[in-house]
């Protein structure tokens, strides 16, 4: 048992409360990690805000980075003292895990959203009863977390905790959607709809791959200025203007690729209309249950594709080391979008993120 300080969500829509809880010992295949930093992702804010069936009280947080403190029976991939980045969990033995697509694991919901460890027990005990967790196989809004071998990625010890944490979800999701899902050829055109942290990660990947034009679209003019600094060739302010027309003013034949991070039906519809023949639009935003999407179906007959992707179609054990190498080479400067906060300021960090004041808040646990 480990005493840990965790940001506990006790009621839907409530702020987090920093509480002392007791964390279970790592079981077979499990790893106890001292969390040093954790990014905040809109998925955390979604669960905090909307009823999605997750049990409360719960500890969220799914972009943890830290140091291995102890390992459970059978763990061979890391040892105490290793520095690690935590990502989403997968089972490792279903058909899609076998096919190197753990992001579509048959047990994805059970391992990432059930609130309990595989033995069915909540991982933490608070002053007045059990506290749920195991969120994305971690629950890293805490000073300690239990993770699994498959979602614990060993990294070099010279990298800053703040830089490491967002690789586990947001950076993987945005960049992976470009590198893995769309895989554009150099010189092909691309637009990123919505330039929050995930959109800017997609944009940095497109710039790295030599795409052009690279068009950033957002309602926030300051974000567009940053997108241009990060290598976008054009920007479009989403102020109600016709998106398809604005894109075709730049690329008359339409775009080869689009990444949508907005999840807004009208935006996705305009995006599909702005694709050239054989163009592809990848959507990655989680939308409220029951959300429907309407498009002109004949659009797809031009060989165009509309598809979804989670976690950037990435296996974290393969992709996170690749992304770190690109960061080291100056090809993925995601440090430009990070703002750090002390762990105790988690509610302020969430408020600043929702208000658009910061792009990728990262909590520091020390
Ligand atoms: Zn699986
Ligand atoms: Zn996330």
Image: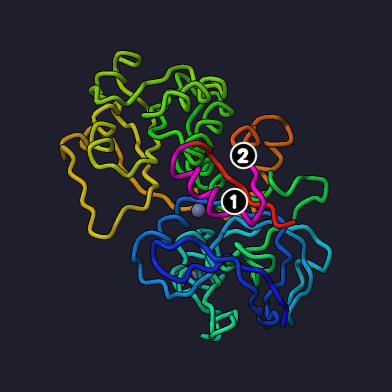
Residue 8's disc number: none
Q: Please say if the residues under marks 1 and 2 sit with CB atoms less than 8 Å apart.
A: yes
Q: Position of residue 295 (x, y in %)?
A: 18, 40
Q: Nearer the viewer, residue 140 or 331?
A: 140
User: Which residue is at 46% across, 69% downward?
Assistant: 113
5 displayed left or right of 190:
right
Q: Which residue is mark 2?
A: 338
Q: Secondary structure at mark 1?
A: strand
In this rendering, is residue 39 above or below 9? above
Q: Position of residue 236 (x, y in %)?
A: 37, 21
- The magenta segment: 339-356
- Decide if residue 362 is in sight here: yes
Q: Is residue 97 magenta?
A: no
Q: Quadrant of the N terminus?
A: bottom right
Q: Secondary structure at mark 2?
A: strand
Predominant secondary structure, magenta span: helix
Q: Is residue 349 magenta?
A: yes
In this rendering, is residue 235 above or below 326? above
Residue 39's disc number: 1
């Amino acid at each position: 048992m480990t005493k840990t300080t965790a940001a506990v969500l006790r009621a839907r829509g409530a702020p987090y409360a920093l509480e002392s809880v007791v964390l279970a010992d790592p079981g077979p295949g499990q790893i106890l990690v001292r969390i040093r930093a954790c990014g905040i992702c809109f998925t955390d804010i979604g669960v905090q805000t909307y009823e999605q069936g997750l049990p409360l009280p719960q500890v969220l947080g799914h972009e943890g980075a830290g140091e291995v403190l102890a390992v459970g029976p059978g763990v061979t991939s890391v040892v105490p003292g290793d520095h690690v980045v935590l990502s989403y969990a997968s089972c490792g033995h279903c058909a899609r895990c076998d096919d190197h697509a753990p992001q579509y694991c048959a047990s994805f919901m059970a391992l990432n959203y059930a609130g309990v460890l595989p033995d069915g027990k909540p991982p933490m005990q608070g002053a007045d009863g059990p506290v749920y967790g195991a969120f994305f196989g971690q629950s890293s809004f805490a000073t300690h977390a239990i993770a699994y071998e498959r979602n614990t990625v060993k990294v070099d010890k010279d990298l800053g905790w703040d830089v490491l944490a967002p690789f586990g979800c947001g950076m993987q999701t945005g960049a992976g959607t470009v590198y893995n899902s769309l895989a554009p050829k150099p010189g092909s055109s691309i637009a990123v709809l919505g330039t929050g942290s995930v959109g800017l990660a997609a944009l940095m990947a497109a710039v790295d791959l030599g795409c052009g034009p690279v068009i950033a679209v957002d309602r926030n003019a300051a974000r567009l200025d940053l997108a241009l600094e990060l290598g976008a060739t054009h920007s479009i302010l989403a102020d109600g203007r016709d998106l398809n027309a604005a894109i075709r003013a730049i690329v008359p034949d339409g775009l080869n690729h689009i990444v949508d991070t907005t999840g807004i039906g009208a935006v996705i519809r305009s995006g599909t209309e702005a694709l050239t023949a054989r163009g592809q639009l990848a959507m990655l935003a989680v939308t409220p249950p029951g959300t429907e999407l309407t498009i002109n179906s004949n659009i797809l007959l031009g060989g165009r594709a509309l598809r979804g992707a989670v976690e950037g179609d990435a296996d974290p054990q393969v992709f996170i080391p690749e992304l770190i190498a690109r960061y080291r080479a100056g090809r993925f400067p995601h440090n430009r979008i990070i703002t750090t906060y002390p762990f105790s300021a988690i509610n302020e960090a969430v408020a600043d993120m929702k208000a658009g004041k910061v792009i990728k808040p990262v909590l520091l646990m020390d």
